């Protein structure tokens, strides 16, 4: 559709106005390495971006688009890494102005916010009021509540708080035809199809999320335990026993030897060993008892305890900064990327070992860690550092790495994704 016509038509909508409409320009729509590297179609600077101030504005633009046949997608902070946004759409609906904190209910322990609020702002507000959300993705500072819901995101403390699907208790969204749908907050409901469950991971297919009510809680005492494991298998065995024992875990992370070198303090790990870090949470006596229990589990699995500060390097730089992926993909002969999947415990170790063999020749170094645990399995996260003799060589090695990974994971009964969503990358 003609850009000038789009700008004029949208600006004329009484619920929008001139100040809410602009062209995308040089703004990046996501941090998908394929787009950053020029492998996928780049975003167009002439794409129209509209930033409604309220749900009525979102409804108006979607109703207009439905009538005109215009293609629309939502735009948060543009930190998605799997190509969640179609670069060929006519209009991007930015949630940037839907960023208010509407209500914090200390009795029900819920917070109601606009879908465009970013994680850092929300977390800071809650902390001042004596609450925590518990949802701490590494993209906390560069992502929005609406983005978390749309991609079914999860955070580093998922062992205690769960993913965003557990925290979401109410929502407001606008259907493609412009109808506003409100799902009132509730502790649980058996009344038919779970609309909140459908919204989680919907990636814009059901409409644009405008508001969410999330469960919050009081900050809890926490104990951290760090250990050196002789290999990934023993570390995985310890992780499995921890989560299946009923101990109130918070964060649980196991790194392969290559990533352990950057996640742990220098010199604390024997050569080729793996860093395991776990926290327990609850009232102080509960957290202390949990720490004692997982210490025994670790030692029984062959691990050696380290100082609680051993994982400080990872904690100090755990949150991604704006442009992180772009900065790491600035050289077209080098591709930085991540792949996250979920695996059952019975195949997790074998899958990680096979990936080391298959991806090691392609990625130098190859980082792998298991960072989200469940009674039935865990999330495996691979970090790729791919170099080529030239751009074409690097791109070919990157494509091979993805192909090998998904084939190997499928043979080990793993999932296509764990928390980054599907996007254009996995849709293929």
Image (tube, grey):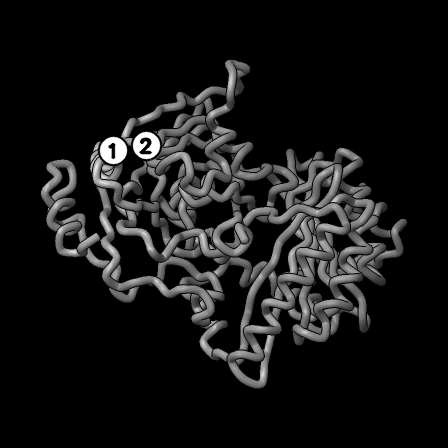
Residue 105: x %, y % from top left? 40, 26
Q: Is residue 174 visible?
A: yes
* Residue 185, above or below 221: above
Q: Residues within 10 Å of mark 2 (few under 14, many from 20)?
A: many
Between residues 366 and 87, which one lies in front from this camera angle?
87
Q: Is residue 198 left or right of residue 247?
A: left
User: Could you tell me residue 188's position as x and y percent?
Assistant: 53, 19
Which is more toward the observer, 349 or 105? 349
Q: Picture coordinates of residue 367 (x, y %)? A: 67, 66
Instruction: Look at the numbered discs 1 and 2 and tell me whether their residues touch, using CB distance below 8 Å.
Output: yes
Q: Tell me the distance, in whole angstroms, between the alpha carbons under discs 1 and 2.
A: 6 Å
Residue pointed to by mark 2: 174
Q: Which residue is mark 1?
A: 59
Residue at screen point 62% across, 73% down: 397
Question: Along the line of sight, which residue is nearer the eye, 205 or 275?
Answer: 205
The answer to whether residue 293 is above or below residue 385 is above
Give the secondary structure at mark 2: strand
Where is residue 203, by image quadrant?
A: top left
Residue 266: name its quadrant: bottom right
Element carrying mark 1 = helix
In the rendered structure, the answer to whether residue 290 lies left or right of residue 184 reads right
Image point 69% across, 42% down: which residue? 280
Q: Does residue 225 appear to the left or right of 142 in the view shown?
A: right
The residue carrying pointer 1 sits among few (fewer than 14), some (14 to 19) or many (20 or more) residues within 10 Å by Cα, namely: many
């Amino acid at each position: 559709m003609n850009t000038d016509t789009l700008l004029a038509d949208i600006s004329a909508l009484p619920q929008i106005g001139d100040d809410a409409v602009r062209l995308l320009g040089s703004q990046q729509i996501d941090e998908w390495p394929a787009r950053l590297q020029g492998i996928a179609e780049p975003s167009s600077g002439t794409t129209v971006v509209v930033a409604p101030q309220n749900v009525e504005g979102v409804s108006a633009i979607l109703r207009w688009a439905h009538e005109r046949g215009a293609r629309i997608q939502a735009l948060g902070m543009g930190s998605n890494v799997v190509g969640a946004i179609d670069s060929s759409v006519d209009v991007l609906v930015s949630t940037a102005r839907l960023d208010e904190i509407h209500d914090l209910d200390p009795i029900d322990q819920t917070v109601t916010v606009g879908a465009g609020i970013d994680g850092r702002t929300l977390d800071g507000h809650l902390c001042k009021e004596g609450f925590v959300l518990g949802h701490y993705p590494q993209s906390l500072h560069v992502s929005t509540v609406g983005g978390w819901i749309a991609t079914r995101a999860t955070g580093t403390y998922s062992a205690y708080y769960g993913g965003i699907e557990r925290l979401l208790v109410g929502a407001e969204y606008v259907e493609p035809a412009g109808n506003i749908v409100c799902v009132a907050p509730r502790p649980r409901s058996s009344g038919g199809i779970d609309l909140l469950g459908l919204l989680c991971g919907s990636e814009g297919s059901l409409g644009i999320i405008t508001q969410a009510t999330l469960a919050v809680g009081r900050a809890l005492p926490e104990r951290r335990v760090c250990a050196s494991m002789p290999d990934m298998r023993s570390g995985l065995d310890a992780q499995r026993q921890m989560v299946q024992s009923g101990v109130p875990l918070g964060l649980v992370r196991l790194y392969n030897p290559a990533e352990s070198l950057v996640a742990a303090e220098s010199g604390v790990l024997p050569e080729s060993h793996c860093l395991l870090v776990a926290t327990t949470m609850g009232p102080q006596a509960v957290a202390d008892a949990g720490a004692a229990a997982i210490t025994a589990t670790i030692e029984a699995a062959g691990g050696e305890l380290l100082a609680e500060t051993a994982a400080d390097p990872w904690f100090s730089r755990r949150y991604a900064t704006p442009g992180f992926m772009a900065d790491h993909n600035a050289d077209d002969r080098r591709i930085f990327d991540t792949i996250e999947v979920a695996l059952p415990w019975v195949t997790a170790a074998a899958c990680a070992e096979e990936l080391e063999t298959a991806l090691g020749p392609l990625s130098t170094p190859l980082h792998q860690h298991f960072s989200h645990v469940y009674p039935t399995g865990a999330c495996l996260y691979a970090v790729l550092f791919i170099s080529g003799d030239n751009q074409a060589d690097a791109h070919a090695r990157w494509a091979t790495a993805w192909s090998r990974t998904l084939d190997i994971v499928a043979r080990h009964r793993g999932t296509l994704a764990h928390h980054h969503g599907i996007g254009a990358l996995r849709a293929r």
